[in-house]
Image (cartoon, rainbow, N blue to C red):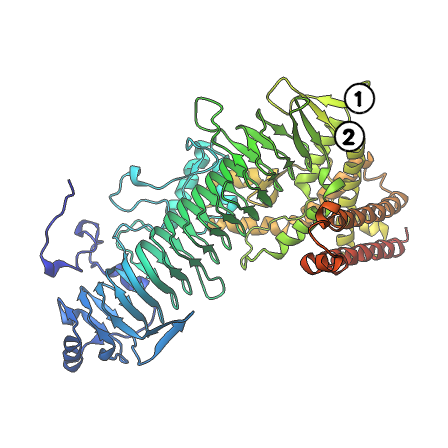
Amino acid sequence: MNIITKHPVNNLGYGFINAKYLPKGKNEYHLRNIQNKNGISYRNLTSTEREILIRNGNNSDDWDKILVSEAFDPGLVKNCKFFGLIRIGKLEPFYLEFHNLRMPVGLYNSTIISCDFGDNVCIDNASYLSHYIIGNEVMIANVNELATTDYAKFGNGILKEGEIEEVRVWMELCNENGGRKVLPFNGMLPGDAYLWSKSIDDEGLQKKFIQLTEKEFDKQRGYYGTVGDRTVIKNCKIIKDVRIGSDAYLKGANKLKNLTINSDEDRTSQIGEGCELVNGIVGYGCRIFYGVKAVRFVMASHSQLKYGARLINSYLGNNSTISCCEVLNSLIFPAHEQHHNNSFLCASLVMGQSNIAAGATIGSNHNSRSADGEIVAGRGFWPGLCVSLKHNSKFASFTILSKADFPAELNISIPFSLVSNDAANDMLVIMPGYWFMYNMYALSRNTWKYTDRDQRTEKIQAIEYDYLAPDTINEIFDAIKFLEKLLPDENGCYYTDGFENSNRRTQITKLPEALKLFNDLIIYYGVSQFLDHVKKNKTNSFEEFKESIPVKITRSQWINVGGQLMKATDVDKIKQQIKTDKIQSWQQLHTIYKKIGNDYYADKLEHSYTSLLEILNITSKQFTKEIFKNILNDSITIKDWMGKSIYESREKDYTNPFRKMVYDTKKEMDKVIGKIEDNTFLQQQLGELDTFKKEVKEIIKKLQL
């Protein structure tokens, strides 16, 4: 039975906060008065203004509770019902226009309960507008309900006074059974979500994460919903317990409940037709359109959900797009792409720069009697068309999976590999270094693309987009160590096991080529860092150059923390500082992210030098001028090969007869896909090659090598 209670009508608009939750000496407006920072000086209505308002079809339970600014025009308020304390800013005889929506300034045809309005707002047909603070030049048209409760949490995983633990909203990342759950909060970065969900075995740290979150927000009841300046809301049904920033655009949404929608004049957020969002945080500059469903979620800044996408119990990193797909219980780092209606991602940690192809089914195959396990995919994860995976599986960075129904769990530890299921011969096939051998164009272009598309204006975490970085170089070293132990059979083939949870053989193809490639990549990585270092520090001699690089005995271990690479020792230090209260807020932690990011150049240089010494099998003392000159010259050869591979992998699109067959003439093909010689990215790569060669020659001369 629905429990409907009766109250005196003259109580409507009052008693927003239960008396038992009011601080001593405070009234129900004490938080509202703190929140309202528009600076408007309000006054009581004059008798003339009151008469005009009544004549225009307005009514109020108490006209003395209607306060207005000095420049208030009562003729611009018509057919409204007011309850409780109402404060109205300047109303002038103008109309506002946004995307062909033209509305006269004023309040029309609305029921308004205990709200504040800034200057020159346009409110028409707001059927139920309750306990909101509306900014300047806001446009609201045709909204069924725009209301706030006294216990509104605006998407944050906190409790208000008097609430029980069972009502707290958790976000169950990476695992369907909630074993890695975290509390969502406004401002949550990918690194926060990773550290929290990954350290689930540290109970002391888990308690501290909860404390950090609860300290971030006031437990008091009675905060009003807010709509920032110049925000436009039209044709929406239910908006409840939502805090909306400035310059946002909401049109045709079905239901928005318990949310923070971050938006400002430089990073506008938009939510479109048919969307239903509940219990979440929308970051700055986000786009959410056309039938999207999102529940218990965080969208980091400049991410997008489109065309019926579903995001449930998941964190979506910055500059990511999910379109038409379904994502559940996943933690996704920045620069993720997932399109096509039948792509599915569940119970996964995807470490960014990833692309989920059409038909990919990553989760809910239930190969056990319990919920799905977990998928852990390093950055650059690229499952091909119609890939089906078993939980649990783990993938090194830049793993590409060919179209296949993989029959068993996988543990692919070799980076930059193509993984195939050879059903005819009943074996798993791994080609290490595939990207460099056959698709160098895509690998290099993606690095450029991710950097170019990083729209963050506040880059708290320094996200690494280069495919050669401490994490991938360490994986390459591990791969070399493993591959060097393999011996060919009588047919020259390499077989091994441990990559798949089955009795099938795993074949490693192109092994000699991969070993040489991986050695070359480590050398190129080291030289690239050296070139940057010499340029930035204006080193004038080889001895000065060597002295400027710190020497470590062993190569440092690194962790991808939300897209930001950190030394494992730094991550351990962060955790310890949180547990010992040296880090007492999320803001302090974010400041440490920035500091680690500022130190990244030096840490990466140190790592590259240690890596170079290890691959050359020498000590720092043995690193002589002659060796330096040799690897500089070797790096030119490697860079030449890279440039050639980039060009050739793109050239295939112009020479492959099956690509060309849909065009009757070359001119037609050039018009459709453009001439290869006009490809700006290829031109850029050629320019970088020339610059690289020039810089190497200058260093050889400058350091007298």
Quarter-wise, where is residue 100 in the image? bottom left
Quarter-wise, where is residue 64 in the image? bottom left
Quarter-wise, where is residue 698 in the image? bottom right
- Residue 591 is labelled as none
Q: Position of residue 32 (x, y in %)?
A: 27, 61
Q: Is residue 181 above or below residue 46?
A: above
* Residue 408 vs residue 642, the one in the foreground: 408
Q: Which residue is mark 1?
A: 488
Q: Is residue 690 above or below residue 344?
A: below
Q: Position of residue 540 (x, y in %)?
A: 84, 57
Element at label 1: loop
Q: Are marks 1 and 2 in contact (CB under 8 Å)?
A: yes
Residue at the spot 47% in from the left edge and 56% down from the top edge: 286
Q: Residue furthest front?
A: 664
Position of 426 with respect to 320 (left or right) is right
Q: How many marks?
A: 2
* Residue 553 vs residue 374, the one in the foreground: 374
* Residue 489 vs residue 49, the one in the foreground: 489
Position of 162 with respect to 552 (left or right) is left
In this orientation, does residue 167 appear?
A: yes
Q: Is residue 684 above or below residue 353?
A: below
Spatial separation of the CA atoms under disc 1 and disc 2: 10 Å
Residue at the spot 18% in from the left edge and 60% down from the top edge: 13
Q: The N terminus appears in which quarter of the rendering? A: top left
Q: Earlier in the sequence, mark 1 or mark 2?
A: 1
Q: Position of residue 448 (x, y in %)?
A: 67, 53
- Crowding near the residue tagged with mark 1, few <14, some 14–19, many ≥20 C-alpha atoms within 10 Å: few
Q: Position of residue 446 (x, y in %)?
A: 65, 49
Query: Mark 2 is on which residue type?
Result: Leu
Q: Which residue is mark 2?
A: 511
Query: Mark 1 is on which residue type?
Result: Pro
